[in-house]
Amino acid sequence: MADISMDFALARQIQIVLLLHFIEGLRQSEIADRLNLSTSKVNRLIAQGRRAGMLQITISSPFQRLAELETRLVGATTLRSAIVTPTLSEKSDTQLQQVGSAAANLLVESLRDGDVIAITGGKAISAVVDNLSVDRPMNVTVVPLTGGVQGKYYTDVNHLVTRMAERLGGRAMLIHAPLMAENRAQRDMLREMTPIRDVFEIARHANVVMAGIGSIEPRGSSYYDLAPLTEADGKLLVNLGIAAEFMAFLIGQNGRVADFPLNGRLVALQPDELAACRNVIGVASGLHKADPIRAVLRGGFLNSLVTDERTVEAVISGLEGARHVA
């Protein structure tokens, strides 16, 4: 509320200055010339107007609803931040590219020279890489969080690490090991090999982590590009209460890493090994990702999430519904 004890002449002068500056867009020097004042006087009048409550700024955005969804999601979870993009297309590839673009912008905004970025494979991370652009080369290092699967551009994490490093102007460090070992003993042996152990140690203390969130619903799920499972196996996983794939690990609906044999064969860091990382960003798009996102959020693995409007509506609905039932 404005200070009514202020001298009328002073209040009127402040009002004129505020109108000229914030409504008509004049610079302080231009206002000084028009009103025959010094620039420092104009600056003081603007400051007085702020202190007196004469200036109120309202920002109106066509995407205000998205900001409200972001606030609701953060309030309902342990996330520190969220970015929700508008769902402008029914085509999943178009949605994913839009989410990937938003995640790429978030990554660039959060990076500092000297940072380490650790990433998974997957279609979402590939979309992030496709949309990366920087104004200058950045002194960053990009490393994988998992071993790789040859055959597709998005399952080969070393390929994505190399492309991301090239786009950022940084350097890549690779892990030359498969994602899935034949057994636990082989997994342990691979993880203890010096070149692999050293890269995982760097990833464990990465400044920024960017990971996709996968569905394990059998039809069309990219998890089956990673693991030697049939569609019948996938249905069994769903019946066992497994809801998501994160960093190649199967995650239960309760948010915990599942006690499932395939998890014991992964040449990868576990989600709980990222506790020291500054920001762990999840990227996912599509209604079929709502249940997986909820499971990963229940696990508390993420600091930030980038997804689309329709997906986040389903995520929030499920979280709020579960809260009412409880």
Image (tube, rainbow, N blue to C red):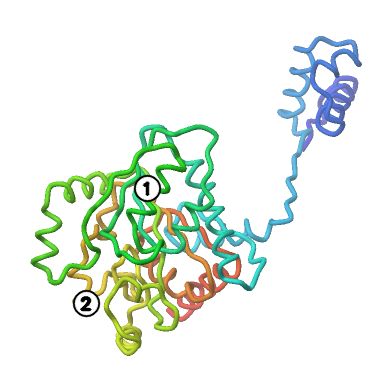
Where is residue 86? Give x, y as percent.
64, 62
Between 315 and 231, the one lying in front of the other is: 231
Left or right: 202 as drawn, with respect to 297: left
Instruction: Kindly identify the residue that appears in the image at 34 percent across and 49 percent down.
Output: 118
Residue 260 shows which numbered tag?
Answer: 2
Where is residue 284? Give x, y as percent.
48, 64
For the residue labelled by badge 1, is the local secondary structure a helix, a strand or a loop? helix
Where is residue 134? Give x, y as percent.
52, 38
Instruction: Kindly identify the residue that appears in the image at 45 percent across and 40 percent down.
Output: 168
For the residues labelled 2 and 1, the Cα–Cα distance comes to: 31 Å
Q: Residues within 10 Å of mark 2 (few under 14, many from 20)?
A: some
> Which quadrant, please, contains the N terminus?
top right
Between 205 and 184, the one lying in front of the other is: 184
- The quarter of the picture where residue 24 lies is top right
Q: Is residue 319 above or below residue 307?
A: below
Instruction: Kindly identify the residue that appears in the image at 42 percent across and 54 percent down.
Output: 281
For the residue labelled by badge 2, is the local secondary structure a helix, a strand or a loop? loop
Left or right: 260 as drawn, with respect to 244: left
Between 216 and 165, the one lying in front of the other is: 165
Left or right: 214 as drawn, with respect to 91: left
Q: Earlier in the sequence, mark 2 or mark 1?
A: 1
Residue 162 shows which numbered tag?
Answer: 1
Where is residue 106? Give x, y as percent.
51, 47
Residue type at tag 1: Thr
> Which quadrant, please, contains the C terminus?
bottom left
Instruction: Kindly identify the residue that appears in the image at 59 percent across and 62 percent down.
Output: 69
